[in-house]
Image (tube, grey):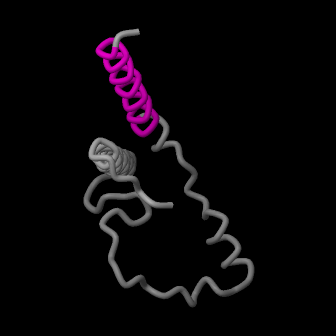
Amino acid sequence: MKRETRTRAMIGFAAGMVAIAIGIVVFLAPLASTWPDGLDSTAEKLGFAGRAVEGIIKTPLADYSVPGLPAPWSTIVAGLVGTVLALAVGLGLAYILKATRKHGTRVSR
């Protein structure tokens, strides 16, 4: 297979995976359970939920919600932001690794 054809196939595959991830966020995120997760339910059962300390850094999308938006849209927007950020970090790391490999330097383990 030619390099150009292989590159196009990889781009098409990646675009398809991104589309699937966005579809999952848009259609399934609003159906997420509102029940407490494992850590929260354990903290409630063992009686130390009230001793939680506010974090040092305030997160903009705490509890997967965007302030000011109604419930389903808030979850969708928070999920989309998280998906795009994860994609950006992954692409950034891939670019850095490709650049180091191109220049002959290796990342030490």
- Horizontal and vertical percent for residue 92? 29, 49
Is 17 contained in the magenta span? yes
Q: Is residue 69 left or right of residue 26?
A: left
- Could you tell me if residue 18 is visible in this image? yes
Q: Residue furthest top?
A: 1
Residue appearing at x 70%, y 86% in the figure: 47
Q: Is residue 15 left or right of residue 37?
A: left
Residue 66 appears in which quarter of the rendering? bottom left
Q: Main secondary structure of the magenta part?
A: helix
- Horizontal and vertical percent for residue 73? 33, 46
Residue 99 appears in which quarter of the rendering? top left
On screen, residue 54 above or below 67: below
Q: Which residues are magenta?
A: 3-26
Residue appearing at x 28%, y 54% in the figure: 69
- Horizontal and vertical percent for residue 36? 61, 64
Front-lying residue, 39 or 85: 85
Residue appearing at x 39%, y 53% in the figure: 106
Q: Is residue 104 left or right of residue 17?
A: left
Is 95 contained in the magenta span? no
On screen, residue 14 above or below 29: above
